[in-house]
Amino acid sequence: MTESQEVQETIDEQQIENARVGYQVATSLWNSRAGEFWSQFNAMLTANSIVLAAATATTAVAVSAPESIPSLKSILSLLSIGVPIVGLALCALWCALHERASGYNEYWARSARELEEQFLNDPIKTLSWGALFGEGEPIQFDGDPKPLRMNRIGRIRVRHTVRLIIAVFVVMYLAILVWGLRG
């Protein structure tokens, strides 16, 4: 073996080791961000549920408040407009946080998948196959006669589902706001 071949082999081994470390870091960050994503989702869902309940209650009380107490009626009317607006602002913040978290999730997944495909492809195919599986492609494991395939409902992306949940809150806040403005 020539000196040039030895140097090339050392470089290749170093590249593969660097790729392994990079892969571990990318998958670790991906898992960490996924945990943060769900914690964030739960916090925003809880906050929106509380604000929605407050908006509904204040608007209901404002609409039915007696005209005989004008100061109470005006405070409740102001709250019946203000609380849904706070809810809409909270939804805008939630949407921004969600898009950022989803973007990072996609970034770390693609980074790890790229390292896996370029340097670790045989026998490691976990993320590469996971991407195909998520898109509904059949995955065939060694020794398993039946391929594995994600069902249609499971292919709906979390990103789109969370957007839909945020949109439902926005619609409810708008309905309460209109109800408060009419009352």
Image (cartoon, rainbow, N blue to C red):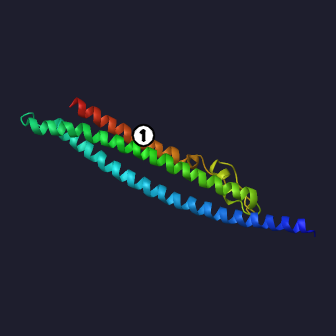
> In the displayed structure, would residue 167 be above or below residue 147?
above
Please, what secondary structure does the residue beneath circle 1 have? helix
Residue 133 at what x, y percent from top left? 65, 52
Judged left or right of residue 62, residue 36 is right
Quick one: which residue is furthest to the front in this view?
Answer: 3
Quadrant where the N terminus lies? bottom right
Q: Is residue 92 left or right of residue 76?
A: right
> Is residue 65 depicted above or below 29 in this figure?
above
Q: Which residue of the protein is positioned furthest toward the right in this rendering?
A: 1
Q: Where the C terminus falls, by quadrant? A: top left
What is the number of callouts on the image?
1
Q: Residues within 10 Å of mark 1 (few under 14, many from 20)?
A: some
Residue sitting at x 46%, y 42%: 164
Residue type of the residue flagged with mark 1: Ala
Q: Is residue 71 left or right of residue 120?
A: left
> In the image, residue 141 lies at what x, y percent?
72, 60
Corner quadrant of residue 14: bottom right
Instruction: Find the residue positioned furthest to the left.
Output: 68
The single residue placed furthest to the top in the displayed view is 182
In the displayed structure, 10 sits above or below 130; it is below
On screen, residue 121 versus residue 64, left or right, reads: right
Residue beneath disc 1: 167
Where is residue 123 drawn, in percent x and y?
75, 64
Viewer-nearest residue: 163 or 15: 15
Q: Nearer the viewer, residue 20 or 1?
A: 1
Residue name at image x 23 percent, y 29 percent: 182
Q: Residue at x 90, y 68 (%)?
A: 3
**Residue at figure coordinates x 39%, y 51% from the top left:** 44
Residues 112 and 7: in front is: 7
Q: Quadrant of residue 174?
A: top left
Closest to the observer, 36 or 133: 36
Q: Position of residue 79 (x, y in %)?
A: 21, 40
